[in-house]
Image (cartoon, rainbow, N blue to C red):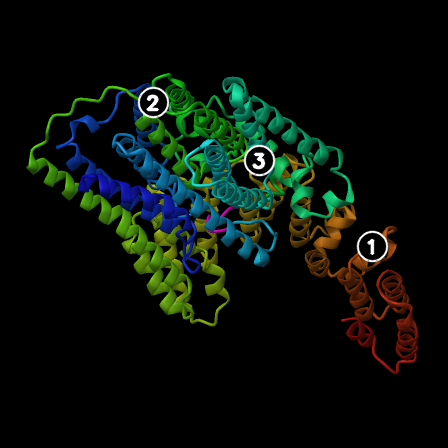
Amino acid sequence: MKPTTKIIFISLLLCVISPLIHSKTALYGMSVPKVVFFWFLVEVMMVVYLIHIQHSSEENPPKSWLSISLLVYTLGLIVSSVFSVSQTGSFLSSFERMDGTINALHFIAFFWVVGSVKLSDNQWKIILIMSCFVALGVTIFGMVESEHSDDGRIQSTLSNPLYVAIYLIFHIFLLINVFINIIKTNNLRSKFLTFLYSFICIIVFALLLYVIVYTKSRSAVISLVFGLIVATLLIGFLKQNLRKYALTGIVFIASIIAILYFNRNSEWVQSDSALARITNLSVLDNSISARKELWEMTLSGLPDRPIIGWGKESYIYYFAKYYSPTMYDNGFWYDRVHNFVFDKYIEGGFLGLLTYLFVIASMLYLLWEKDTNIGITQKSLITGYLVSYLVFNLTVFDSYVSLLILFFLMAYIQQKSTNNRINIKKIKSIWLVFFALIMSFVCYNVVYRTFKTNKQWTAASKSTEVLQLMTAYKQAYQDAWIGKYDVGLDFALQKDRVKSGDFDDLTKLDYYDSSEKALKELLEKYPNHPILLSQLGFIQQYAGKSQEAIKTYLLLQTIAPKRQVNLMDLAILYLEAKDFDKAIKLFDEIYQLDKSYNLALLYKAYGLSLKGDKANANAIIYHLPVEFIVENLQFIWNVFKNNSDEESLMFFLSNTTDKSKFKRETFLVWLKIAAEKNNTTEVHSSIFSFYKHFLPESELPKINQLIEDVNAKKSPPDALVNYFE
């Protein structure tokens, strides 16, 4: 093996290991370290490969429909990123996603290198076996850490249950391939070894399947079923000697589906959180309904920028512009549609979507080309996985591991094809040195600085002293390139910590000025970014710059005209500025967007009370649903206090027919007001209502005695309040 081939082979092995790389202490430690590590390996492979082909022209990049389609996709990706609504965001992405154009270009380079260098069958076996061991490591780690998970969903070293699911789905297909090879291989030393290897394979398969189920991802289970059915049908149709096994597999899969479906409401399914979630396909489920609303919302804006799209990592702009008011209960800023067709369309328009589908089609075409040196069983299993991948991404989105697998398979298929090679003339040594220097520059900025920024940001976030925190954040922000968005935004998010801290005014003012400056700098690189604008408005508000904050939120209103939470921030700023008419008008407009958004009515009532319109303020509150009043009672109490009319709230609570929706705190507010107003009748009513709903009968004598003492003026009414508190 040539030294250059050996370096590329070792680098590929390290890429396979990368899903295990993570940091429990770093911010986004499950994504940043592994992606940066991958970038470094790809950059090394690129330099080594360029040297390698100077002495091995037969390993020049192959000419195939796959390589052509990927080249077209790359050009489309670059065009959409250059003309993106935020070029910086498209190219660099964020620490949370690490999925900008720079990341895509690294994967494309990975394909060109690995798909061109000829590796032996033994080397591929080593790579695939190593990948199975890594998957087992991810599985075991996930099973161990799930015991400490709040929701019981397995995330392992990949930060998200969905990422774990798609990664292990690939290895399910890989293990099936290994198992088939074990069974049909005749050169094993004994039947015992065949049995042992088969047994190990089945155990690992079962562990992987268990973890996939306990990611509690319906998309994962459904996509795995689809992929297995397609792979099994292909094997059964094309391999006559395996047809009976394929038929058995189909029957087995169908039986499992039937058992779960017909027993979905049974106790043994519902008592298991994973099975209960997987079998719940109701559109009323929060996760399903949120996706449905996202897709409907996305459809409404499809004619906007239809050719080259909004640019990679730009869905946040689309989301803000076409936000559906019915999503108010879901407070997230969505940066993905959770559907690959929509996602590719938004980021690249028709050009991006069609070139992506062209890549997938070319991949399948090259896979099934008769001259491609891959067996029928392997072709069927790869096709099955690709079906799983596409079905999975109909409700999810790509991640580092899903892209690693996809480009790994592309490179594998490309290398196994017999296409002609592109003729590349030998490059002069001076140009190789120049390329190496360029890659060193890229490595410094893309790898080293990204890792350094993540490390600095993590250290800054753990600072306990505010001055130390400010210094650390400023330094991390100044040094950052990739990750600058994350550091600057997180610096601004420390506002509540600074505001509530025991610091002098000069320190707070320095913080507000520094974070405002950082946000404004970021907005030059991420023009009109809705999240940055919302945080800038908060900072200006905290710094006492109300008029500037209002201008910021008015700009945000033009970008996200229907997102209630941001409109509420603007209306509340109007209240603080004592511009009651503007505030009340805006609260009305917010309510009209979706008439189940009762928070706008509550704040309208508050605005009316501040304006002195006590009657209309109370009338609005009286017509709010009981459940909403119970959830927001403390704020409502403040409104009545502002009106000097707490007794009206007391009588409202007293006269509410259905008190089953009350909480302990609801009765306590009722009792407190009654005690403050020395209204003995309402004190008795609140106590007995409370007793009826919450207290055991053994407490009744104590309560009666306490009431007698209050009536006899032996104890003040507050004694009752203190008792219940």
Find disc 3 in the rendering and name its residue: 219
At numbered mark 2, what does the secondary structure look like: helix, strand or loop? helix
- Indicate the position of residue 700 as horizontal and vertical percent values: 91, 71
Q: Is residue 56 above or below residue 660?
A: above
Can you tell which mark lies on residue 652? Answer: 1
Q: Secondary structure at mark 1?
A: helix
Does label 3 or label 2 sit earlier along the sequence? 2
User: Residue 247 versus residue 649: which sits nearer the camera?
Assistant: 247
Q: Amino acid at mark 2?
A: Leu
- Depth check, mark 2 against mark 1: the one in front is 2
Badge 2: how crowded within 10 Å, few (<14), some, or many (20+)? many
The label shown at residue 593 is none
**Between marks 2 and 1, how big is the CA–CA gap?**
71 Å
- Would you place residue 593 above or below residue 644 in this image? above
Along the horizontal axis of the image, is 538 left or right of 121?
right
Mark pair 1, 3: CA separation: 48 Å
Image quadrant where residue 466 sits: bottom left
The residue indicated by pointer 2 is 66
Name the chief secondary structure element in magenta: loop
Residue span colored magenta: 156-160
**Does label 1 or label 3 sit earlier along the sequence?**
3
Q: How far from the left and from the top, in percent, is residue 127?
A: 36, 41
For the C terminus, which image quadrant?
A: bottom right
